Amino acid sequence: MCTMITERAGIDLGRGKSGPDWFVVNEANVSYDHPYDLPLEHALNIDFVNAAGGPGARVAVELSVEAARRLVQTIEAVLARAEQRGVLEDIPLA
Amino acid sequence: MYQTNDYEGMLAETVTLQGHGGDTINAYLARPLGPGPFPAMVLIHHAPGWDEIYREFTRRFAAHGYITITPNLFFRDGHGTPEDVGSSVRASGGADDALVVGDVEGAIRLLRSLPYASGKVGVFGTCSGGRHGFLAGCQLTGIDAIVECWGGNVVAAPEDLTPKRPVAPIDLTASLSAPLLGIFGNDDRSPTPEQVDQHEAELKQLGKDYAFHRYDGAGHGFFYYDRPNYRATQAIDGWKKVWAFLSARLG
């Protein structure tokens, strides 16, 4: 079924690439619903989008539940290592 | 039934229609060639979008003798590939029930205006489109037959209602004004078999004209030959049930 389980995360600073060029992404739309390509009934879907760029301004991934959980853990682990080394930064270069 | 010495022809094209609130939206229309009169169908596409399989379904219904229209329910959400548009609508919480029902009403109005139409009009939908088909049957009058395939969220808890989906369609069953055919897979998780039981019990209690066919070994979306949930044996039988029902109700 269509679960309609979806959440939207604002992205204050990000870039995405789905063709030859990079573009600004300002939202990540996360859903657990029908994937378009992954051969599962439901998947964890993430669309990194530019909300003003129209439906095509999108970098999409469709993940199994296990893969999604591993991704979350991996992101957290990488950020923790960077923090331990004192190299975390979120201020854009001038 | 088609005979090998019959002439068969079809016209399929993109058209526009006036949907909810008089909005102009586009739609895919396929019709048998000839003077008619032909019965007609409105197909309500599923949440993934106004996509290739629904265009094929449109032509398939036309090949079976129905003037068939599939409105682009996401027309107002921008244009791009069906996947990109569908993803955008998914992120915004799905289609708005009021707009969908209004667009279906506009499609019916267009079909009835065609000089080669018999005046009989049915509705078919799968997944969210199945739910919308049932909803349309409860909120509109003048529909002659409804085919609801695995409509999820017909039974919905209050906490699952949203501004776009403000009512659980099962609560409107008393208003259902058309004969209903339901097709479901017993391995589906939404609607679950228990929810289909609830749906059927409500129809039965209210004395509605309905028939449900429920298939073992099939889950959600088992008509979709391009997805892993496709189940050939059950889908072939399900389509036979659809054609028999529509033939009896629409001619």
Image: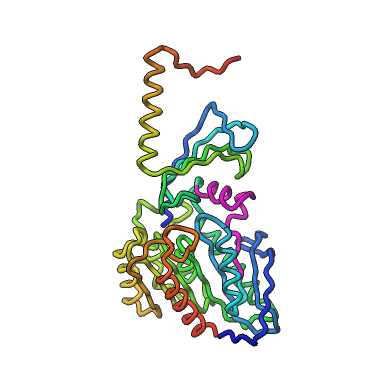
Percent coordinates x, y for residue B114 in the rendering: 68, 77
Percent coordinates x, y for residue B209 in the rendering: 40, 80
Percent coordinates x, y for residue A18 in the rendering: 59, 37
In this picture, residue B191 sits left or right of residue B129: left
**A77 or B47: nearer the eye?**
A77
Residue under the point 35% across and 80% down: B207
In this picture, residue B224 sits left or right of residue B108: left
**A1, above or below B247, in the image:** above
**B57, above or below B189, in the image:** below
Q: Quadrant of residue B219?
A: bottom left
**B38, above or below B53, in the image:** below
Q: How is the image coloured?
A: rainbow
Region rendered in magenta: B69-90
**B185 or A27: nearer the eye?**
B185
In this picture, residue A69 sits left or right of residue B122: left
**B61 or B20: nearer the eye?**
B61
Q: Quadrant of residue A64?
A: top left
Magenta region includes residue B242: no
Q: Quadrant of the C terminus of chain B?
A: bottom right
Percent coordinates x, y for residue B178 in the rendering: 47, 77
Residue under the point 38% across and 52% down: B160
Residue situated furthest front in the rendering: B4
Residue situated furthest top in the rendering: A86
Residue under the point 53% across and 62% down: B45
Residue under the point 57% across and 40% down: A58
Q: Quadrant of residue B53?
A: bottom right
